[in-house]
Image (cartoon, coloured by chain):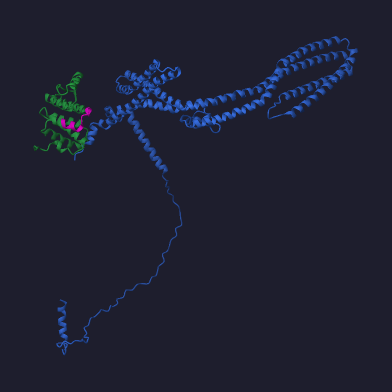
Chain colours: A green, B blue
């Protein structure tokens, strides 16, 4: 087995499921904000505004954001892990996270291509995609033969 | 370990209520599907039982009646309609425009009403099936009760006839009074004429007075006789009350009245003839006038007498004869009544036995005894059993019990669906977490309520607490003078304790030995003092 550095997921793996989810959301947000090259103070404030917290928790949240921004793993990996924790049935929550990511993407009034790409990656990983009815039927009929083009909601 | 659970709950509050909402929606579907199944079962029962009834009636089993299929399908549609309730509730909950809200609300009310009807039908079928036997027995009981009622009506005819006879008697009395008044008027007129003609004849005056008093007495006697006859007629004779003695006494009284009347009439005729004789000479000139008055009075009296005779023959006699017949039948009626009452009692016991097994009848009794008296102004004399219940009582119990139940069943599905939708709605959390402004009426009202509660709480507490009142009360305080207590003083004395002093003494102990070294040896005390410390070591 390949030796690897202890990453964020390993660090918080012993925590409650709810805590892990919040950590994952913070990590996803941090990585999305960093996707366009810089993690600005406005973006950080917006994340902290979205995540309701008490004043004593602020430092902890900023630390997690920094850890998330410095995490070398790709955003796809985090989305995949989060989906693994929550299961396939929590579509509404996945949609909620995508909505949060969109809000963060447009906080600086510029949505970069990297940010859109990352949101699409996360959406596809979550399975929050829309496709025409005919395509869905075709997918069901030719489950493995044909791959369809997916795109995130919105 | 990091714990951000509270952040998650605030971040995604839907996670707290959404699973329960989902469960409620499933529950609502379960209720609606069950209600739909009731509709389907009713539909099936209409088809199957209807065909069976036709087959039993006609004896043909092969024919399939389409009418029943149509009715059954109608109920099948009702069953399917039940399944539209939750979608309609969802549409109503999320409807954005008031128009659609009204439309969906009306649709939901209509579907709920249909559910109510379906459930009531189900309950009614079950109740009807269970109370069939009771109904048969109750019908028999009702027949007996009707028989008794008819009999009592027949028995009450006698009373009615008495009233009618009294009415006729009154008519006759009025006519007789008229005769009397005619007579009196005629006599007065004649007397006036005679007075005018007779002048100062004292005998004529005396006779006239006697005649007047005789007429008065005669009138009184006739009135008394009439009263006696009336009282004789009003005596009711039954199976248990024979009043022969009373009748005999009244008859004797009437006979005595008749004798008196005859005597009085004779006296009157004698006085009149005498008066005529005396007045003959003096009043020959007024004779035609008196005769005219008399003829006039006689004519009038004859007419009235004719009327009396007619009434007596046409009405009174027939009534009296029918009364006599009824009086004779009274014994028969009484016997019949006793038999019917016995039958009613037996049937009542039978109904009570069967109906006590039926829930609705028991409930109807309880309602009649309890809420019926409290809220519905129903009055009960003594104890009440299932047999004493009317159809109205049973219907009331049915609607109070099954009606309410059906109503709740009909609306509960929609309400549960609404509850589920509300719990799954994220807007609810937004509204809940919205801070209440201090200038809003809601905030002020809630603040006012809180203050009121606090005020009441403190006032109750202070009222309940025992009040401590400070008063200056002058009391005589007994000053206790401390008396010196003389105690013996303990004197410590130094007493010398004698110390034990060890002194060495030489005690000669003769020792028996045969050792030649020791024999003849002399004891040196210095040796013994040097050897002892060594031994200690």
The image quadrant where one finds the N terminus of chain B is top left
In the rendered image, residue B489, in percent from the top left (x then y), is placed at 36, 72
Residue B433 in sight from this viewpoint: no
Tell me if B73 is positioned left or right of B324 in this view.
left
* Residue at 60 percent of width and 23 percent of height: B150
Instruction: Tell which of A1 and B350 is nearer to you.
Output: B350
> Relative to B496, does residue B358 appear above or below in the rendering?
above
Magenta-drawn stretch contains A85: yes
Tell me if B398 is positioned left or right of B219 in this view.
left
Q: Which residues are magenta?
A: A79-92
> Relative to B192, does residue B363 appear above or below in the rendering?
below
Residue furthest left as drawn: A2
In the rendered image, residue B360, in percent from the top left (x then y), is placed at 46, 29
Instruction: Tell which of B184 and B476 is nearer to you.
Output: B184
In the rendered image, residue B19, in percent from the top left (x then y), is placed at 27, 31
Residue furthest bottom as drawn: B520
Tell me if B304 is positioned left or right of B34 in this view.
right
Residue B101 in sight from this viewpoint: yes
Q: Main secondary structure of the magenta part?
A: helix
């Amino acid at each position: 087995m390949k030796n690897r550095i202890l990453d964020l997921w390993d660090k918080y793996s012993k925590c409650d499921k709810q805590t892990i989810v919040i950590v994952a959301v913070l990590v996803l947000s941090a990585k999305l904000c960093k996707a366009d090259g810089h993690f600005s103070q406005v973006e950080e404030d917006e994340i902290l505004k979205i995540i309701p917290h008490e004043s004593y928790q602020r430092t902890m949240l900023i630390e997690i954001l920094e850890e998330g921004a410095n995490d070398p793993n790709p955003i796809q990996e985090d989305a995949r892990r989060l989906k693994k924790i929550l299961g396939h049935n929590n579509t509404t929550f996945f949609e909620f996270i995508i909505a949060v990511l969109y809000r963060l993407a447009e906080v600086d009034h510029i949505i970069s291509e990297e940010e859109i790409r990352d949101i699409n990656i996360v959406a596809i990983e979550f399975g929050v995609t829309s496709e025409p009815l005919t395509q869905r039927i075709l997918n069901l009929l030719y489950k493995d033969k044909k791959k369809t083009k997916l795109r995130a909601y919105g | 370990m990091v714990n951000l659970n509270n952040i998650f709950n605030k971040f995604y509050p839907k996670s707290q209520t959404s699973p329960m909402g989902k469960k409620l929606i499933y529950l609502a579907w379960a209720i609606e599907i069950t209600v739909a199944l009731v509709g389907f079962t009713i539909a099936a029962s209409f088809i199957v039982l209807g065909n069976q009834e036709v087959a039993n009636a006609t004896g043909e089993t092969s024919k399939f009646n389409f009418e029943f299929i149509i009715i059954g399908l109608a109920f099948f549609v009702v069953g399917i309609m039940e399944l539209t309730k939750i979608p309609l509730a969802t549409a109503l909950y999320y409807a954005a425009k008031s128009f659609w809200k009204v439309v969906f609300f009306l649709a939901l009310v209509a579907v709920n009403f249909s559910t109510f009807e379906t459930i009531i039908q189900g309950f009614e079928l079950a109740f009807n099936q269970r109370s069939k036997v009771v109904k048969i027995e109750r019908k028999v009981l009702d027949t007996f009760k009707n028989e008794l009622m008819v009999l009592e009506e027949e028995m009450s005819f006698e009373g009615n006839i008495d009233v009618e006879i009294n009415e006729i008697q009154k008519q006759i009395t009025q006519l007789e009074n008229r005769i009397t008044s005619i007579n009196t008027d005629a006599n007065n007129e004649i007397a006036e004429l005679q007075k005018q003609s007779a002048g100062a004849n004292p005998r004529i005056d005396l006779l006239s007075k006697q005649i007047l008093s005789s007429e008065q007495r005669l009138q009184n006697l006739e009135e008394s006789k009439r009263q006696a006859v009336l009282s004789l007629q009003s005596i009711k004779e039954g199976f248990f009350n024979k009043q022969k003695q009373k009748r005999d006494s009244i008859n004797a009284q009437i006979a005595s009245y008749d004798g008196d009347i005859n005597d009085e009439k004779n006296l009157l005729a004698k006085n009149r003839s005498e008066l005529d004789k005396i007045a003959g000479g003096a009043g020959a000139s007024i004779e035609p006038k008196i005769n005219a008055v008399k003829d006039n009075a006689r004519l009038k009296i004859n007419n009235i007498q004719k009327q009396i005779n007619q009434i007596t023959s046409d009405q009174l006699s027939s009534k009296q004869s029918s009364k006599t017949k009824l009086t004779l039948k009274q014994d028969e009626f009484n016997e019949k009544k006793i038999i019917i009452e016995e039958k009613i009692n037996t049937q009542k016991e039978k109904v009570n036995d069967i109906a006590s097994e039926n829930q609705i009848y028991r409930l109807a009794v309880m309602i009649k005894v309890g809420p019926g008296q409290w809220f519905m102004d129903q009055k009960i004399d003594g104890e009440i059993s299932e047999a004493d219940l009317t159809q109205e009582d049973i219907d009331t119990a049915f609607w109070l019990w099954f009606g309410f139940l059906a109503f709740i069943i009909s609306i509960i599905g929609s309400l549960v669906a609404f509850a589920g939708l509300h719990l799954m709605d994220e807007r609810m959390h937004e509204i809940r977490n919205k801070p209440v402004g201090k200038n809003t009426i809601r905030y002020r009202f809630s603040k006012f309520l809180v203050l009121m509660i606090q005020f009441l709480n403190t006032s109750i507490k202070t009222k309940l607490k025992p009040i401590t009142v400070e008063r200056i009360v002058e009391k005589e305080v007994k000053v206790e003078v401390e008396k010196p207590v003389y105690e013996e003083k303990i004197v410590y004395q130094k007493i010398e304790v004698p110390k034990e002093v060890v002194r060495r003494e030489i005690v000669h102990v003769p020792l028996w030995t045969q050792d030649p070294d020791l024999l003849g040896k002399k004891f040196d005390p210095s040796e013994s003092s040097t050897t002892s410390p060594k031994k200690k070591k």
